[in-house]
Amino acid sequence: ALRKPVIKALASIADPGTFHLVVPFLNDKSKTIREEAVNAVELFFKNGLSEETIAEKLKEVLGAGAPNVLLPHTRSKTKDIRIAAILLLGLLKDKKVIPRLLEIAMEEDVHDIVVKALVFIGRSLPRSLLPFFRVSDAYQRRIICEVAGKVGDSAFFKHLVESLKDEDGHVRGNAAAALSNMNNSEAIPHIKPLLLDEYENIQEETIKSLAKLKKWLDQNEIIKGLSDENHILKKNTASLLGLIGDKGALEALGRALKDSHVTVRVSVVEAIGAIGGAEAVQYLILALSDESPEVRRVAAIAIGRMRADAGIEPLIILLKDPDVWVRASAAEALGNIGDSKAIEPLIQLLTDESGFVKAVDIEALGKFKTERVKKILLQLLNDMDAEIRSTAVGALANFSGIAQDIIPLLKSREWSVRKTVIEVLGTHFRAESMAYIKEVANTDEDPQVRETAARYL
């Protein structure tokens, strides 16, 4: 009866000198005790006991059958037991458990720990993973590629290159990511064709993988992709140049703003924004007049993120754009830049016919901490639209002394308004509003509002 609390106590202290006392319990007759011991060994590892010490002691006490002692626990109904057992199997570094680990990797809740266990094995026995690049199950091939990328052993290079042509898109993507982690320039010509992969998410993974290898990339060669006939290659080339971040690509990207494909121009604008700098801002300002609303929207967002003063006047003009999303993005950008010249145009935008634009506009105005803006936001607390009232409350959080102005909205019929008021009071005015927060936590009719209030008690 004392075994379980003793094991718990030893695990909680995790003194390396007592580890040898815990391991024998893995062979106990009681399933409960065996599971407690599995958890305990994991705790010793988490508290700093080396993987070598743990593996050595497990093999010493359990012998060659150590994996067989742990494998049944990978089928436990208790998630924590499964996770602990999987980790310990990895620490044993026994290649015989690889098939079982790959089998259970398909269970979503243990994917990460299985990868970790396989990495332990792969670092010690990299060649033991090679046969599994060719298993029939695509998910298992994905896992092996992921593990290979984390281990980074050169033994995997040839197999990862072959996996770039796998019939499964995720395998191809994982192989590209793994090769990029190996810092080998020879991977580049093998990865590049995936810029034209049939799946967009694999194209995106390829872009990220190539960007990791940027010190070996010839930027002038990459730039040629902007002139290719294939619009997908042009789009992905622009994205890659953006991730590389070299200002030397700006001129070529600027020319690509005239491309006939909208998707290409959008990627070009995003890339220019990612590279940044004064020259980039000028190209982005040009993009604000693009015929595509999506290009104008992305350009506005980029200028706002860069907080570029040169973009203020063009963005103010864009507040009258016929497209809802463009007007909203221009307002957001002006709020991010924070120049007072934008205040009056943003105030005028409050009459916009779109509630969405109006809400974004209110958030932007909230970033200007002037008395005029504060007064207007307080007036919006009486708006007929609940979304507008709620947004105004959130914007007023940037101002001092407004607690008493928003407290009456705790009586609002709309739960979303009451919830926002509580969030603002609890975050910014907790001390002076505690009585109201307690009342809402106890009496509000909506469980989400009560739960939100309870977090601030």
Image (cartoon, rainbow, N blue to C red):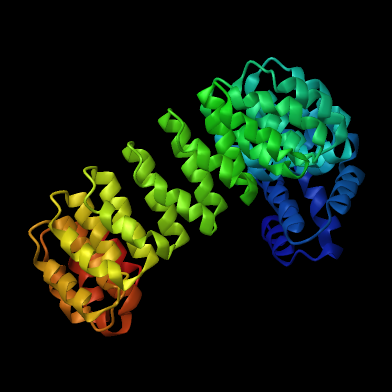
All told, the count of numbered labels is: 0
Give the image quarter of residue 406: bottom left
Q: Is residue 209 left or right of residue 272?
A: right
* Front residue of this view, candidates 17 and 368: 368
The answer to whether residue 317 of the structure is visible from this angle is yes
The answer to whether residue 114 of the structure is visible from this angle is no
Give the image quarter of residue 134: top right
Q: Residue at x 70, y 23 (%)?
A: 164
Q: Residue at x 52, y 47 (%)?
A: 272
Give the image quarter of residue 194: top right
Task: Give coordinates of residue 2: x percent, y percent.
Answer: 69, 59
* Front residue of this view, candidates 277 and 39: 277
Q: Is residue 310 left or right of residue 249?
A: left
Q: Residue at x 64, y 48 (%)?
A: 248
* Front residue of this view, candidates 271 and 99: 271
Q: Residue at x 63, y 29 (%)?
A: 173
